[in-house]
Image: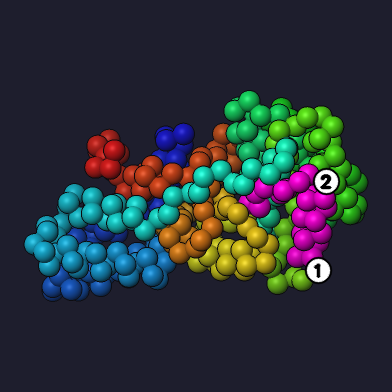
Amino acid sequence: MLSRLRAGLRRTRDSLLSGIGRILSGRADSEEVMIDQMEEFLLSADVGVSTSEKLAQKLRTHLREGGAGAGPDLLALMKKEILDVMKRPLAESAPGGRPHVTLVVGVNGSGKTTTVGKLAKYYADRGEKVLIACSDTFRAAAGEQLEVWAKRAGVDIVRQKSGADAASVAYDGAEAGLARAASVVLVDTAGRLHTKVNLMEELKKIRKVLARKIEGSPQEVLLVLDASTGQNALIQAREFGSCMGVTGIALTKLDGTAKGGVVVAIASELDIPVKFLGVGESLEDLVEFDPIEFADALLSEENSPSPLS
Ligand SMILES: Nc1nc2c(ncn2[C@@H]2O[C@H](COP(=O)(O)OP(=O)(O)O)[C@@H](O)[C@H]2O)c(=O)[nH]1
Ligand SMILES: [Mg+2]
């Protein structure tokens, strides 16, 4: 898991370390200028406005108190501060009835279906009996794509013809989950823009149907965000969060971007916990979000001992 996380964050880490290195070894006229450069750089790495500001402030205090202005000392400080601003994921979501239902939502192409496949494997590996429901009835190919993932993960899938009512597939999924004594039901949905009212209504209908069938479900509404979209992901999280009752976030495609700093922004600026990170396209490329491991993988040079562990 750790090496997958490290590998997935390679681009972001390389960019951060070389950027910070360049600023430290550059000829800034003063420490003030250096800190300004650092703040700007963090912003460009999508760490987010308030978090970049907070980090810059910490650096300022650190230097004023006579701390070293360069090298490993400063990197360790940054790592500690990044860790401090990120919230820990909350303990497991509300108990509710069985099976535990996760409704997966997010815009088109964010990685929902891929994440459902990875989650199926994640839970199956932990001894859960998993069932997937394909409520993306919008595209004809969606069902086949999910079918492939279900086969890879070795779990059951429930689907209908494309064009069917998405809520009715969710209903079937919940019913089959109960009938087959599944412990986890994952509901994949069609991509939608938070601005498309009718699609949002469809999601609400899915929620209602699930709750009627299984008490307290969906216990988790997982919002899937593409990390490579940077600050856009933050905006989507705010919009979805306010109208869909999102309980957790999965950030995907960290392996394909140098903008993984957005994880820090999301983990520090939102009240919704980050739960999973997607670090590749295969079944195993999903890691639980752990702030300590993340901060470490983000800023540690290869083979250097972690000041955090
Ligand atoms: N590199 C990489 N690609 C990903 C990841 N997650 C999803 N993808 C790719 O993103 C594309 C869209 O994924 P999909 O699951 O179909 O998105 P959906 O429309 O939200 O269901 C596919 O090509 C996936 O292979 C990830 O963590 N890393
Ligand atoms: Mg999909």
Spatial separation of the CA atoms under disc 1 and disc 2: 23 Å
Residue at image x 27%, y 35%?
303
Q: Is residue 206 above or below residue 119?
A: below
**Is residue 234 visible in this depiction of the protein?**
yes
Residue at image x 42%, y 34%?
3
Give the magenta part as a residue range. Answer: 200-222
Q: Which mark is residue 213?
A: 2
Label 1 neighbour load within 10 Å: few <14, some 14-19, many 20+:
few
The local secondary structure at tag 2 comes to helix
Q: Nearer the viewer, residue 308 or 281?
A: 308
- Residue 119 is situated, as x and y percent measured from the top left of the image, at 63, 39
User: Does 215 appear in magenta?
Assistant: yes
- Residue 88 is situated, as x and y percent measured from the top left of the image, at 44, 50
Taking the view exactly as shown, the residue that stands out farthest to the left is 66
Residue type, numbered disc 1:
Asn
Instruction: Tell me the residue that label 1 is attached to.
Output: 198
Residue type, numbered disc 2:
Lys
